[in-house]
Each structure stands twice: as C-alpha cells, then as structure tokens.
Image (cartoon, helix red, strand yellow):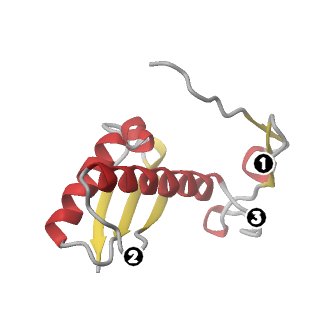
C-alpha cells in the first residue's frame, strides 16, 4: 500500500492519566481513565478516541458505498461506535459495537451498504480477526 497520510500523536505524562498531542498541534488533550477503572472520568480516554475515529471512518465508508451503489441518502445516516474495554485472565482487550442508522433506506439495501462499508473501512480492516465487532442496523 502507498502511505497517503501519517498521523503522529505523542502520549506524555502518566499514560491514561497523561496528555496526547499531535505533531501538527491540532490535537491537544488531557486524558483520564474512566471511573469504571479507577479514574476520575473527567477527561476523554483512549476508548473514546478510538470510538470517535471508528465512527467517523465507518460513516465515510458507508457514504462512499452508497454513492457507488447509486443509493440516494435523503436523510443523513449516522454511525455510533461503542468501544468496550474488557478484561479476562489473559489481560485487557477491546471490542466494538457499531449502530448504523440509515433513515429512508430499505433494510436489505442498508444491510448491503453496511457490509460494503465494513469491508472497506480502514478501522474495520485493521481490527478484523483480532477484535470482535458487532454491527446493528437501527430504525
């Protein structure tokens, strides 16, 4: 593959309770662990950042799939990503659930577009075979 773009972000401080900053200065965030794992929950966390990226990327892949299939999107679709921090005897892991809303698109057509988007989305491709991803069509 040809590299089209490289995001460079540095974590400093105390990891989950530290800071992240991008090399171009656009991203500057303080982090905190969620309350559920001992943090204050007052700042964003790595799972939220991953969910934001996955939702946006999948949404773009979905819109591209609709354009290619010549399916009009009369109402704006939406993608919600839930990224779960999990733990078992071997350590920590993540899983994800995506909820896709495609108002005005027939259920079978929406499912085909979601399947196409899942096949092409870089996040879906990156986690395939390693992270459980569930996809639900809502509405």
Label 2 close to label 1 by CB (< 8 Å): no
Q: Nearer the viewer, residue 101 or 105?
A: 105
Q: Nearer the viewer, residue 14 or 45?
A: 45
The spot of residue 129 in percent (x, y) is 30, 37
Q: Earlier in the sequence, mark 2 or mark 3?
A: 3
Q: Residue at x 60, y 59 (%)?
A: 48
Which of the numbered marks, if any, corresponds to residue 27?
A: 1
Q: Is residue 82 visible?
A: yes
Q: Nearer the viewer, residue 54 or 65?
A: 65
In the rendered image, the quadrant that contains the C terminus is bottom left
Please state the total of marks drawn on the protein image: 3
Q: Residue at x 69, y 63 (%)?
A: 38
Farthest residue toward the bottom? 139
Marks 2/1: CA–CA distance = 31 Å
Q: Secondary structure at mark 1?
A: loop
Q: Residue at x 81, y 37 (%)?
A: 24
Residue count near mark 1 (Cα–Cα under 10 Å), binned few <14, some 14–19, many ≥20:
few
**Circle 3 or circle 1, nearest the eye:** 1
Farthest residue toward the top? 2
Q: According to the image, label 3 marks what residue?
A: 43
Residue count near mark 3 (Cα–Cα under 10 Å), binned few <14, some 14–19, many ≥20:
some
Q: Secondary structure at mark 3?
A: loop
Q: According to the image, label 2 marks what residue?
A: 75
């Amino acid at each position: 593959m040809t590299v089209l773009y490289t995001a460079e972000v540095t974590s400093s401080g105390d990891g989950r309770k530290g800071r992240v900053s991008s090399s171009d200065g656009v991203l500057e965030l303080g982090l905190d662990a969620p309350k559920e794992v001992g943090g204050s929950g007052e700042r964003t966390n790595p799972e939220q950042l991953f969910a934001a990226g996955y939702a946006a990327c999948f949404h773009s892949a979905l819109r591209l799939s609709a354009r290619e299939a010549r399916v009009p999107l009369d109402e704006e679709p939406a993608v919600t990503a839930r990224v779960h921090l999990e733990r078992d005897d071997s350590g920590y892991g993540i899983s994800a659930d995506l909820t896709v809303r495609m108002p005005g698109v027939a259920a079978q057509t929406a499912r085909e577009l979601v399947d196409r988007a899942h096949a092409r989305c870089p996040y879906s491709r990156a986690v395939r075979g390693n992270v459980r991803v569930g996809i639900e069509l809502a509405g």
